[in-house]
Each structure stands twice: as structure tokens, then as C-alpha cells.
Amino acid sequence: MVDDQALVRSGFRLILEGEDDFEVVGEAADGDEAIELARRLSPDVVLMDVRMPRMDGVEATRRLAGVTDARVLILTTFDLDEYLFDAVRAGASGFLLKDVPPDDLVTGVRAVARGDALIEPRMTRRLLHEFARHPGPGSGRPTLDKLTEQLTSRELEVLRELARGLSNAEIAERLYISETTVKTHVAHLLTKLGLRDRIQAVVLAYESGLVSAGG
């Protein structure tokens, strides 16, 4: 858990340690401490605040990618587009506001730990809109041609719908296939593209030009 307020960390610890399958292995007060602890403790999930002294949560998330396989769940009181956008760009697997109910926090940690991406529902549409408007340079990312070579036509269809914010159930209905088949396609395309989760797939879809602002 990474937050510059000890009281906040204590509250999160109390919630999470009430679950039999959770263990809080460390606490940090800023990004620098977070990187050091993550390197030493190898956690599965890092709960990361955004605004902190010395190094903020977005930069810490970006640097953590080079030292640990831990998935980062961003927690913040600031419902601002730039934090959501920057955190996802930095490699975060989830983003929640600190005012979520305790049960939602627990559910969020479990989701991120098992490899799912998590964005607070009322932020999802804003995130997708922002990527559509500013897809980024795509440096080091597969081009659309390369993407087409790597994925089957069905996987490309699934990726397009995924990038538009549809759930597995919605994709299944749209493409007239089962939800289990959608899950299989998502798993395959993530593996083929070397992506960690669905959020990274959304980023790639926009940066490669597979999906654009026009849909």
C-alpha cells in the first residue's frame, strides 16, 4: 500500500486484512519507497496513491514496470481526467476513487490480482474518449499492419469491441458467439501481443489505429 497519509494506509490495511486470502506485506509513503519495497517484497498488487511527495503515483507506476510484475491499482480522491489517462499510460491495471465502498475495494484488488483490468465505471467512457482524442505516438507499438498479421480476423473483431468499452457478454452478443469464446479470444490476443491486461489492449487498439475517434 502506497499513500503519504498513514491514516489512509491503516484504513486500507484494516479492510484488506479482514479477508482470508489477503496479506498486506508492506507500506510506503511515497513513490521512491514503493519501488524499493516492491523490488524487495515482490507483491502481487500495489495500491498506489497519486499525489505524494518526492515521486507521485503515476511516475512510480511507470518505474515499477521495470522492477516487478506486480499489478498496480491506483486509488485517488481526485476524479480528474489527467490522472486516469496518465495512470493507464504508465501501466496501471486499475483505477478507483478512494470513496468506493470497502466491498468494492476488495473486489477491485481481487480483479486486478487475477489479471483483469479495472476502471471505476463512471470513468470508463471518459478514458476511452480521451484515448480516441489523443491516441499517442505509438512508439514501440505494433502498427495496424503488424496487428493484422499477428491476430486472426475474429481476434481483431474482439479487440475492436473491447476497445470500445464492451464487456465480454456484450461482445458475445454483438459477434454472435459465446461469452466463453470471447474470453478465449481475449486471452489469446493478450498473449500474442505480449499485453498484461485489457487496459493495455485498449491503449494498443487506439495507438495502432485499429480504433479511432470515429469508432
Image: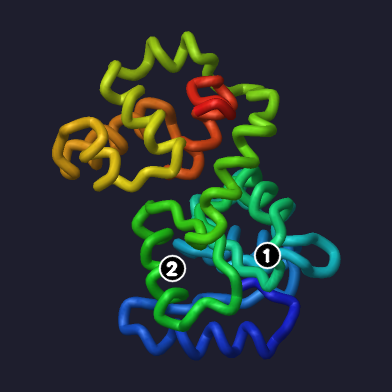
Alpha carbon separation for disc pair 2 and 1: 19 Å
Question: Which x, y percent locates residue 175?
Answer: 23, 31
Q: Is residue 37 left or right of residue 205?
A: right
Say which residue label 2 marks: 109
Q: Residue at x 49, y 44 (%)?
A: 199
Say which residue label 1 marks: 79
Question: Which x, y percent locates residue 181?
Answer: 17, 37
Q: Nearer the viewer, residue 131 or 173?
A: 173
Q: Is residue 35 visible?
A: yes
Q: Residue at x 61, y 37 (%)?
A: 131
Q: Nearer the viewer, residue 164 or 58?
A: 164
Q: Is residue 5 left or right of residue 61?
A: right
Q: Quadrant of residue 123?
A: bottom right
Q: Residue at x 67, y 68 (%)?
A: 49
Question: Which x, y percent locates residue 105?
Answer: 46, 75
Question: Mark 2, mark 1: which one is toward the viewer?
Answer: 1
Q: Is residue 114 above or below residue 5?
A: above
Counting labels gives 2
* Residue 143 numbered mark, or none: none
Q: Quadrant of residue 177?
A: top left
Question: Which x, y percent locates residue 84?
Answer: 64, 54
Quadrant in which the N terminus appears: bottom right
The mark nearer the N terminus, 2 or 1, is 1
Q: Residue at x 69, y 24 (%)?
A: 137
The secondary element bearing badge 1 is classed as loop
Q: Is residue 14 left or right of residue 6?
A: left
The crowd level at tag 1 (other Cα within 10 Å; few <14, some 14-19, many 20+) is few
